[in-house]
Image (cartoon, rainbow, N blue to C red):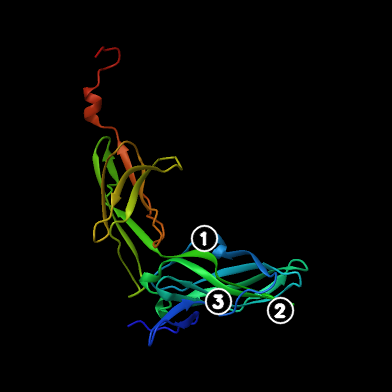
Amino acid sequence: MRKRTVALCAATGLAAGAVLLVPTVTTDTSQGDTRVLAVSVNDGRSILLGPTDPVTFPLEVTAEDDSGIRSVGPIGVWGPSYGVLKVGPTQCTPTSATVSVCRGTVTVDPMKKDVFNDEAGTWFVDLKVNANDGDHFVGQTAAGFSLKRAARVTGYGIPEQATEGQELAVSGWLARAFWSDNKFHGYRNGMTYLQFRPAGSSLWTTVATAVSDPTGTLTAHVRATASGDYQWYSPGDKWTGDATSTSLSVAVAANPAAATDSPGPGVSP
């Protein structure tokens, strides 16, 4: 059974004995001319959380009031299935007489069960901005960001040497973090692309696609055309991060049979 102190949720009565949890850090409402100009979480990048290691990410609020900004707080973040995380103390730095940038950090630790699998997805910043003259701004969805389950993909099955035109069966395994048991498990129905990079090139080109089976296994068949590297790439989705496998190299030699069948110099076919 999951147990958690819901620090951001206020209880609202619906009927006798019924309670609805509404994510909010305060029941107050906005007052005056205080406003939020910008909110940045993790510098605009998705947060990819693996099964064991904690992640700390920055949160930055830019706010304005004609009297100046005194503080941002209370502040927290909330997500699907009543997921909640606390924001550390924020420090506000004035950039002008009316505008301040207030910075804090959030730490999420899957080993401490800060989050569960069904809480991956879109999260929101809930905050109160306090001005020097007593005005304040309250926003339950001041900004949105993505907290995703980290993914990994591995590749195997490529021979070190092949003959031009030879069919190659490329295999892989796509997995994603399970915060429930702190392990990686196979990820089913994940769209994944097999990419090829010719020797001496830095450009990857998709040569096949595959969808992972219930165990996360990937399989694709391609023809060897030139020496180079193969890799699997999974773009992820709303709940799962992207992942790229290490490259698999293959040296492709000319097909002797093709050379034998070709007409010699000066010979008309």
Find residue 76 and report its horizontal and vertical position in percent. Answer: 54, 76
Q: In which quarter of the image is residue 90?
A: bottom right
Q: Give the CA distance from mark 1 to mark 3.
A: 17 Å
- Asked if residue 109 shows in the view, the reply is no
Mark sitting earlier along the chain (1/2): 1
Q: Which residue lies furthest to the front in this view?
A: 15
Q: Label 2: how many residues lie within 10 Å, few (<14), some (14-19) or many (20+)?
A: few
Find residue 30 and report its horizontal and vertical position in percent. Answer: 63, 74
**Residue identified by numbered label 1:** 45
- Asked if residue 71 shows in the view, the reply is yes
Circle 1 SS class: loop
Q: Give the CA distance from mark 1 to mark 2.
A: 34 Å
Q: Say above or below: 47 vs 6.
A: above
- Residue 23 vs residue 119, the one in the foreground: 23
Residue depicted at x 25% and y 18% = 263
**Residue identified by numbered label 3:** 87
Q: In this view, does 252 lie to the left or right of 86?
A: left
